[in-house]
Image (tube, helix red, strand yellow):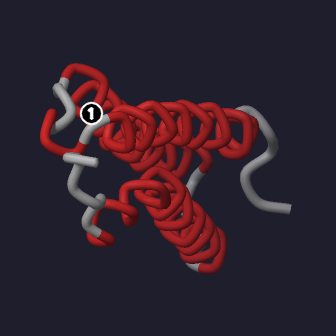
Amino acid sequence: MSERQLPPRRLWWLTAGFIVWCSALVVLYALHAIGCAFGWSAGPLRWSLAIVLLVHLVVIAWMWRHLATATPDPALGQGAVFLQTIVVWTLIAALVATVITFAPSLVLKTCI
């Protein structure tokens, strides 16, 4: 067996997309609460939420593009290929989850 073992530090990529999703959750809801508490009008509040959402989507898409085009380390063998494939699919899942979770908040009533 000539393959080296995968370094554990590469496993954090499995959660990277959902860490960005969590960041979007915290920032969007905090911004929404602050905007409603201080009585911001619907237009600027909606635009600020859209910009924050777009920034988070761009970060996940950048990670997806970066990892999808990278070549796995051949010294690590099939384990690296498998890990990269799983990471790319978790990033796709995080991107879809971010859109499904937060995009409806842009079209609903801002403050009730």
Residue occupying image coordinates x 80% and y 45% = 109
- Secondary structure type for disc 1: helix
- Image quarter for residue 72? top left
Residue drawn 46% across the image and 50% down it: 17
Residue at the far front in the pictured view? 1
Residue 13, compared with residue 42, is above or below; it is: below
Q: Position of residue 82 (x, y in %)?
A: 44, 36
Where is residue 97 drawn, in percent x and y? 67, 40
Percent of width and height locating residue 104: 75, 36
Q: Residue at x 62, y 36 (%)?
A: 93
Snapshot quadrant of residue 34 = bottom right
Q: Residues within 10 Å of mark 1 (few under 14, many from 20)?
A: some
Q: Give the farthest residue toward the top.
A: 69
Residue 41 in percent (x, y) is at 57, 53
Q: Nearer the viewer, residue 91 or 14?
A: 14
Q: Nearer the viewer, residue 37 or 9?
A: 9
Q: Mark 1 = which residue?
A: 67
Q: Residue furthest right?
A: 112
Say how many tags the image has. Answer: 1
Say which quarter of the image contains residue 64: top left
Relative placement, left or right, of 37 versus 82 is right
Q: Which quarter of the rendering shows the C terminus? A: bottom right
Q: Determine the residue positioned at 63% across, 74% down.
A: 33
Please tell me which residue lies in front, 72 or 78. Answer: 78
Judge whether 21 appears above or below 67 on screen. Answer: below
The amino acid sitting under disc 1 is Leu
60 sits to left or right of 45: left
